[in-house]
Image (cartoon, rainbow, N blue to C red):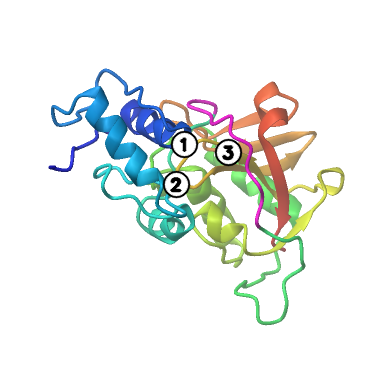
Amino acid sequence: MPSPSIGTGESFYGVKSCIRSGTFQPNPSANLGGMGKGECNNLLKRMITIAGMTGVLLTGMSNLVPQQAQAQQVESQQGEAYTWPHQVSTKQQTDPFTNNRPTQSANLTTGSATGLQIANYAKQFIGIPYVHGGRSPQTGFDCSGFTSYVYKHFGISISTGPIGQLKQGYQVSKSDMQPGDIVFFHSGSRSGYHEGIYIGNNQMIHAPAPGRGVQITDLSSSWCQSHFAQVRRYF
């Protein structure tokens, strides 16, 4: 049986959802290579029986790989896909990351920056457009590209993807959050997370989604409250 091709955007999330649920309800715009509903159902049922196969790549349904194995590839090649607050996954996620402070051997370069300096510096980029995979004011920013760029200015080297960032620094409680900390949220993106820099007064600055520039958002919004994951500190 030939491997069907899958379109991007909504069709990707439709296929991803059907793999998780075991049902096939594609977006009408998805290109499924002429396969009927029954054929696709059978194909999906065979695929989801493979241990650990819960992820899907944009190149086709046959390219299933474990979700964690995709993390490095997604992070290094694509950054995170926008979902804030669009196409949000309602699936509960277990956070695999610890809250231990970094050891001397941690892959984290600290600088002399304070959290307040980080927060204030980030504000000058308000309005810079969202660009998937963007990592500079010249190219635009995605959410993790924005945070890593701001931190780099102060000599603090963090990953350009959420998965890598969650393995660096150390977790702090929401009640102990300080300006300059990075706030993470569960989302429906391929990385599984959205993020922003806390600037004080229960607000964060972040690069949310295509069509929106870098902006300040109140953390009391319903989306932020319902999708909050954790806060991490890197300085």
- The earlier-in-sequence mark between 3 and 2 is 2
| Residue 80 image position (x, y, % from top left) | 45, 45
Residue located at (46% from left, 43% from top): 142
Q: Is residue 139 visible?
A: no
Which residue position holds label 3? 206
Residue 20's disc is 1
87 in relation to 43, above or below = above
Callout 2: helix, strand or loop?
A: loop
**Quadrant placement of the N terminus:** top left
Dots 3 and 2: beta carbons under 8 Å? no
Dots 2 and 1: beta carbons under 8 Å? yes
22 in relation to 75, above or below = above
Residue located at (70% from left, 23% from top): 221
Q: Where on the picture, by quarter, is residue 234?
A: bottom right
Callout 1: helix, strand or loop?
A: helix
Q: CA distance from mark 3 to mark 1?
A: 29 Å
Q: Where on the picture, by quarter, is residue 106?
A: bottom right
Residues rendered magenta in the picture: 85-96
Pick the front one: 65 or 162: 65
In the displayed structure, does residue 91 sit left or right of residue 55?
right
Which residue position holds label 2? 54
| Residue 101 image position (x, y, % from top left) | 77, 68
For label 2, count other residues whose C-alpha is less than 10 Å away and answer few (under 14), some (14-19) or many (20+).
some
Q: Amino acid at mark 2?
A: Thr
Q: CA distance from mark 2 to mark 1?
A: 7 Å
- The earlier-in-sequence mark between 3 and 1 is 1
Magenta highlight: main SS: loop
For label 3, count other residues whose C-alpha is less than 10 Å away and answer few (under 14), some (14-19) or many (20+).
many
| Residue 44 image position (x, y, % from top left) | 33, 38
- The earlier-in-sequence mark between 2 and 1 is 1
Q: Amino acid at mark 3?
A: His
Callout 3: helix, strand or loop?
A: strand
